[in-house]
Amino acid sequence: MNTKEIYDLYSQSNGISTDSRKIKKGCIYLALKGEHFNGNLFAEDAINKGAFKAIVDETIDTDNSEDFIKVDNALKTLQDLARYHRRLLKTPIIAITGSNGKTTTKKLCQSIFSTTFKTFATKGNLNNHIGVPLSLLQIDASTEIALIELGANHQKEIEDLCAICEPDYGYVTNFGKDHLEGFGGVQGVIKANSELYAYLNKVEGKIFVDAQDQLQNQQAEGGDLIFFNTDNDLLKFVSAHPYVKINLEENIVTTQLIGDYNFQNIAAAYAMASYFGISNDKILKALAEFTPEDNRSQFVHTDHNQLVLDAYNANPSSMELAIKNFDRLEADKKSVILGDMLELGESSYEEHLITLQQLDKQSIDQAFLVGHAFYEHQFKSEKFHFYKNFEGLKKHLQDQPLKDYLILIKGSRGIALERCIDLL
């Protein structure tokens, strides 16, 4: 069965499901395989729960063979199906990738674009080789703008995702020290994220570029570039104490985002919205009302402390910016709770040492470092406390509670430092 024939069946269905535990009646179940799971084993169960068809890449021993579509590779079928669907759409697609800030930028854009257009944006972290095709298949013909987040942790991944979603516009937030193990170092990060530029240049798409980022300018050179953050831009940064305050045509707005590093995300979203003709009044209203979530750039008040919560993820670049920003905030008592930065490979020891050295120079009362990468340093400082795991930190905070502190919380997703909130 070819892609068109499968798509015709998909058009009659109630969408795609890759989880046999979450079957919607009339959907198509697609049996994916991974290192620790095999969706083919649950295909018959999916049919019994009401799936319209099941796409499998192994033979299913059953009397109801008409319920199953056998393909060579279920993942490739999903990607081909999504690409076929995308080519039928007239919807402009903006692809957003980069080391830091891509999810915040995407959500800011979604908030602004939704004031004027029927807008789709990647949900959650569905930004990889499975998530991107699933996202595309959620876009319907009435959608006027689609924001697709592209995530990657190795070379050629952005290139492959572009070949599936075929974006018309693109934005790379920055080149940072993320996934160094998979990318093969900082130069690998630059090369991998620039695959979006290469694709857009090939198809004569448009690229949004921060005029102040010389490295981005160099990598995007030769493309159809739309610059923002120029000296002539109407949008200006005012302050971040702690919330980012902006000035747009003499209109001062205080956002709910913390950290001056978030101004670039705001500026990018403003540039894209302006390009598509959204009025400044609507942009300002959307920026003022935008509320961060998912433990990203949030300011949280507990009964005992104030928290700068940025615990969704961390890499050396974002950690450095977060610490610098935190140092500028004023409070009588300040503390930080930092978790290991994962996926750094051979750079892990050095990068965690650099973070500790930076932290040692900051005006903080205490620092709590969680995870094996930080623990192996045991950096000599009276204000530093090291814990191999979260349980060690938990016991300390239960025995010696913090009160009346301003606290930065940041670490990689695997450390899950949002668990601190109930202890603070």
Image (spheres, rainbow, N blue to C red):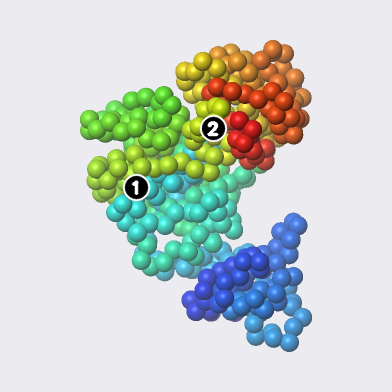
In this view, the residue in front, 204 or 412, is 412
Task: Return the mark for residue 350.
Answer: none
> Of the residues under marks 2 and 1, which one precedes in the sequence?
1
Which residue in the protein does label 2 denote?
A: 302
In this view, the residue in front, 423 or 83, is 423
- Residue 284 visible in the displayed image: yes
Q: Is residue 2 left or right of residue 270?
A: right
Q: Amino acid at mark 2?
A: Thr
x 28%, y 31%: residue: 252
Q: Which class describes the residues within 10 Å of circle 1: few (<14), some (14-19), or many (20+)? A: many
Q: Which class describes the residues within 10 Å of circle 2: few (<14), some (14-19), or many (20+)? A: few
Which residue in the protein does label 1 denote?
A: 112
Above-or-below relation of 49 to 282? below
- How many angstroms separate mark 2 from mark 1 (CA)? 30 Å
Residue 154 on image: x %, y %: 62, 45
Residue 41 on image: x %, y %: 74, 70
Above-or-below relation of 42 to 248? below
Q: Is disc 2 in contact with disc 1, using a CB cutoff of under 8 Å?
A: no
Please tell me in which quadrant of the rendered image residue 271 appears: top left
Above-or-below relation of 220 to 165? above
Q: Amino acid at mark 1?
A: Ile
Helix, strand, or loop for circle 1? helix
Q: Is residue 116 left or right of residue 156?
A: left
Residue 415 on image: x %, y %: 67, 37
- Residue 4 visible in the displayed image: no
Residue 200 on image: x %, y %: 43, 50
Quarter of the C terminus within the rendering: top right
Helix, strand, or loop for circle 2? loop
Quarter of the N terminus within the rendering: bottom right
* In this view, the mark in front (2 or 1): 2
- Furthest toward the front, the residue is 303
